[in-house]
Image (cartoon, helix red, strand yellow):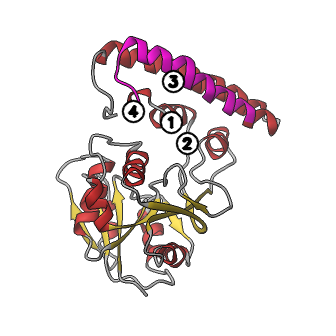
Amino acid sequence: MLNLSLYIPCFNVSRHISSCLEAVCSQTYPLKDIIVVDDGSTDETVSIASRYPVKIVRHGSNKGLGAARNTGIRAATHDLVASIDADCIPWPDWLERLSDCLKDDTVAGAGGKLVETNRVSLPDRWRTFNMRQHWGDNFIRNPAFLFGNNTIFRKSVLQQAGFYNERLRTNFEDVALSETIRRGGHTLVYQPAAVVEHLRADTLSSVIRTNWKWRFLGYRYDITFGNIMKGIFKQRTEELRYFLGQDVARRDLPCAALSLVAVGYAVAADLKYLVSHNGERKVHPL
């Protein structure tokens, strides 16, 4: 087996970190280099993580997800660096399945499939279908990007790509990095046989806000009136069509209503952000 390191970015995840580490330590793939990156937590995350055979690296303050990921990568001992989010539980063979992808020397990184465990409430059901973090059930060579919640990369390729963009504090850092790696001529793969279970639970307000951050127009456009208005008419219209298509196909009218609210909120949030940041360049922290 190839030697590899694994890191877990953490911020106030005391509810989930124990379950995540239990599963990580029970992988069929032996791990000797497990790194917990604490990004300025104010809860019991560090004290819980310290009960496990892990190396803990701490930020003095919250620097954001991109910075936490970079700290984990730099602390990794081996060239192969896996990561999993703290609110995910990997299946026992998750890492074995992902690492197999990098036995192919042409592959720079791989990502697995995230499945939602909470799907009963309206916000969680809406997230499950309209904020999916996987590409389906088939192996894909060069998907649009790798979702950051569970990945493995060659450290040398991450260094070449300039690591994660630390200005992207909470979202889109995975998309931006994947695009940079792809532009560098490298291959990424999606392996649905590598499965992690997502423990997230949302409220109506949290899922609406998170959806906007996921699809924030400032990631793609400079913050100008023309760009934002074009983005609203093009991107938000496409989102609404996609959401309602999913909802109607399932005959889920409550989700359809939430889709209308979510897109309406996104438009209002876009305009509010435009007023306060007009003229700024793209790629803004949220």
Q: Secondary structure at mark 4?
A: helix
Residue 34 is left or right of residue 246, and the answer is left
**Mark 1: amino acid:** Ser
Q: Is residue 38 visible?
A: no
For label 1, the residue is 206
CA separation in Å, label 3 and label 4 = 14 Å
Determine the CA span between mark 1 and mark 3: 13 Å
Assign the C terminus to one quadrant of the image: top left
Residue 241 position within the rendered picture, expressed as x and y whole percent measured from the top left:
68, 27
Classify residue 237 by image quadrant.
top right
As measured in the structure, the alpha-carbon distance from the residue carrying label 4 to the one carrying label 2 is 24 Å
* Tag 2 near tag 3, CB within 8 Å: no
Position of the N terminus by quadrant: bottom left
For label 4, the residue is 219
Image depth: mark 1 or mark 4 in front: 4
Vertical relation: 278 (above or below) 196: above
